[in-house]
Image (cartoon, rainbow, N blue to C red):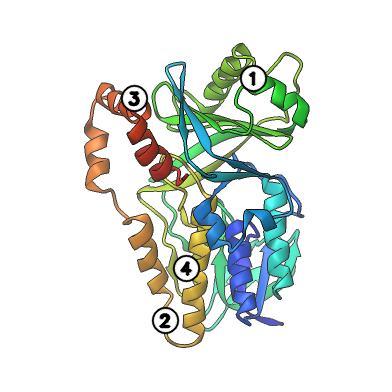
Amino acid sequence: MKRWEVIVVGGGPGGSTAAWQLARAGRKVLVLEAKKFPRVKLCAGWVTKACMADLELRPADYPHTIQAFESIYVGYDDRLRETRWREPASFGIIRKEFDTFLLRRAEAAGAEVREGARARAVEVGADSVRIDIGGEWVEGSLVIGAGGFSCPVARVLGDLSDEESVVLTQESETEVGLDLLKKIAPNYGVPELFAEPDFNGYAWYFTKGAFLNIGVGCLGKRPSVHERRDALMDRLKRSGRLPSGLELTPFKGHAYAIRRGKVRKVAGERFVLIGDAAGLAKDFSGEGIGPAVRSARMASEVILGWFAGRAELSQYAKQITEIFGADEEGLTDKIVDRLPDRVIHAVARLLCGNAWLRRRVVLEGAFGIG
């Protein structure tokens, strides 16, 4: 059996970034990806400037769809308010293009990539990790779990709990055509975010290149995410953003954990979890690409130190706590949980309605835009 130094389970932005970092440092890396690329990935699809810096990628050098935007609209109570920056604040991308680009970059750096290879079992021994990919076992010194919310490494090693805070989404991305999009979108190329009436989530309408991405995400089951999706569709049709006869790609759903309350174990004996597998999506906004890439870089640096005998994998867990927050409910969460809905809604309206708070707290804080 061939022995790898690092096995990465999941070839999304986090997994491919970790593989790229480790392979270019000379480590023997195997990436196991259950899908065949390019594959459709549900995501509103924007990346922040900080994320692009972490990827060491200049927008001008990226060869696929990339929509720079210098403003963003936030809507609530049927009102849209614009926030502007003096330069591009973030960039819209198409995930099937973006993820493929990053995975191929890891491959070019020396990582071996096996697509269509689903991890079916994970076993950690005294000196190795073994993974069953369907009749074949691969072995490495350690494993990086980068397979998203349902990552098999996280299921086996991450101490998952029913007490996790989980966000549910419904999304659709359709190649509509540039000319038509510019006709129907009142703010073409600029994301529009719409707070849910109960402020337990938000919806979006985002045009980028020839593509339209719409969706909704929420915490809680009432109203259900499907009911919220239907209400969004009605609003968009009434506003003219979805003209009669426009056929969309069918909506699909996915889930992700946020770092609130009980969270996942992100490191242990011969494993680390990154990105959505570690439950690192940003609270409220759900932005996951940036945290996935940032955690991949952090994990890679610790792993390189581990191989050199100067670091322990537990250092990664400490760094995650320092940057993404502690693994227990904080004082702010406890206070918010006890506030009446009318108070929470009043604060949310203030955050959305006040120009300074909307920029600093909502967009630059929760979303990382700017």
Residue 297 is situated, as x and y percent measured from the top left of the image, at: 51, 67
Which quadrant of the view contains residue 103? bottom right
Residue 226 is situated, as x and y percent measured from the top left of the image, at: 56, 25
Q: Label 3, secondary structure: give it.
A: helix
What residue type is disc 4 on?
Answer: Met
Residue topped by disc 1: 241
Instruction: Please identify the quadrant where the N terminus is shown.
Output: bottom right
What residue type is disc 1 on?
Answer: Arg
Query: Is residue 152 found left or right of 194 in the rendered image?
Result: right
Q: Are marks 2 and 4 in contact (CB under 8 Å)?
A: no
Point 70% across, 16% down: residue:
243
Residue topped by disc 2: 311
Residue topped by disc 4: 298
Q: Do the residues labelled 3 and 1 touch (CB within 8 Å)?
A: no
* Residues at marks 3 and 1, CA–CA distance in whole angstroms: 24 Å
Q: How crowded is mark 4: few (under 14 residues within 10 Å), some or many (20 or more)?
A: some
Q: Earlier in the sequence, mark 3 or mark 2?
A: 2
* Residues at marks 1 and 2, CA–CA distance in whole angstroms: 53 Å
* Residues at marks 2 and 4, CA–CA distance in whole angstroms: 12 Å
Q: Label 1, secondary structure: give it.
A: loop
| Above or below for 88 versus 214 | below
